[in-house]
Image (tube, helix red, strand yellow):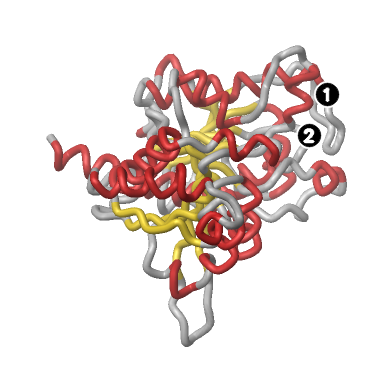
Amino acid sequence: MTKPVIAITTGEPAGIGPEISIRGAACCHEMARPVLIGDYTGLKQLASKMDAGIELLKLDMTKWNPDILSEREGSIGVIDSPLLVPAIPGHLDARNGKPVLSFMDIAINGAQTGKFDAVVTAPVQKSTINDAGIPFTGHTEYFAEKTGTKRVVMMLAGLVEKNSLQNNYMLRVALATTHLPLKEVSQSITEESLLETASIVNHELQTRFGIESPHILMTGLNPHAGENGYLGDEEIRVINPAIRKLRSRNINVSGPFPADTLFQPHYLEHADCVIAMYHDQGLPVLKYATFGHGVNITLGLPIIRTSVDHGTALDIASKGLGLASHGSMIEAIRIAAEMALSSKKRKRIVE
């Protein structure tokens, strides 16, 4: 099967995004045909400082021919989207806020029109975009808006490596709510929202990950999953009814489980995803177990989008090249490529 074309937006130019994008792309030729989206001049200068053997190939979106990437094996394609001012590592400049958004727009359009099989995003600095006068809350919300998607689900994933006596397993954690103040979480969890979230997770695990019969675990909201109503009644009023309805729709969901005991290998090794009720209930566990090679995945979009599990690391960028880890970028590209191949395989079967 032809290797998928993966667009990589290079993120905040003053952070580590450009470096890890180049390094990640250079490591992934066996699994994908990488195409960077960013300032070609700056990326070329950066690549020459990193490794003289890295070849960047400027591509023209108006005369799109991804086969050239196969013909020039080992080269990294670049779609040029110039910055307004040269980037200085570690120093933000609001004048580059709009160009960073342009990276995303090119990637989204290219994925929607079939030029790219998936999109991987390097981290952006939200404040730079907002300082440029553009309201921006994050990649997830921006991709949802630009693709006209009503509801998306944030899922992080990473391989948990065990010792020689235990099996490695893929830990996936999806969120019922995302970036909300804790006091707003309870009122935001409804039976309808849980039905939508779990349905999206189940569908994406089937279509994007090739898991025919996913098993999903769902946490409770309260300590001890409410202790039969003594520590809160959201489990009784909302979560249990949602789980019953999901099962009636042949979606294999178990729970609600107390979050403090659910994240153990003997539960997780036999599950395909955990749905946590809020951000800091599920993600601290995943990031502790997989940080440095975890991946952020947006479910529910009409296109495939993955990202690294960390921020722009301006402090690291300011200290020079070679200090930033690109492990998460490699994993983001790998998972995006696998999702793209799985989607194509399923589409052929359906057709």
Q: Residue 48 versus residue 274: which sits nearer the camera?
A: 274
Q: Where is residue 51 in the image (x, y as percent from the top left)?
A: 67, 50
Q: Percent position (x, y) of residue 3? A: 35, 44
CB atoms of marks 1 and 2 within 8 Å: yes
Q: How crowded is mark 2: few (under 14 residues within 10 Å), some or many (20 or more)?
A: many
Callout 1: few (<14), some (14-19), or many (20+) C-alpha neighbours within 10 Å? many
Where residue 142 sits, quadrant-wise, is top right
Q: Is residue 26 visible?
A: no
**Residue at 65% over, 46% down:** 20
- Name the one closer to the observer, 264 or 56: 264
Q: Where is residue 317 in the image (x, y as percent from the top left)?
A: 80, 44
Whether residue 242 can be seen here: yes
Total numbered circles: 2
Q: Residue at x 66, y 26 (%)?
A: 137
Mark 2 residue element: loop
Label 1: which secondary element: loop
On screen, residue 126 above or below 131 = below
Q: Please tell me which of labels 1 and 2 falls first in the chain.
A: 2
Q: Is residue 275 left or right of residue 127?
A: left
- Residue at the disc numbered 2: 14
Give the residue type that dot 2 points to: Ala
Q: Residue at x 83, y 37 (%)?
A: 89
Q: Residue at x 24, y 43 (%)?
A: 249
Q: Distance between the residues labelled 1 and 2?
A: 8 Å
Looking at numbered disc 1 in the image, what kind of residue is underneath it?
A: Asp
Q: In this view, does 320 lie above or below 45?
A: below
Residue 310 in percent (x, y) is at: 67, 47
Q: Which of 37 and 292 is in front in this view?
A: 292
Give the quadrant of residue 140: top right
Mark 1 lies on residue = 93
Marking on residue 333? none
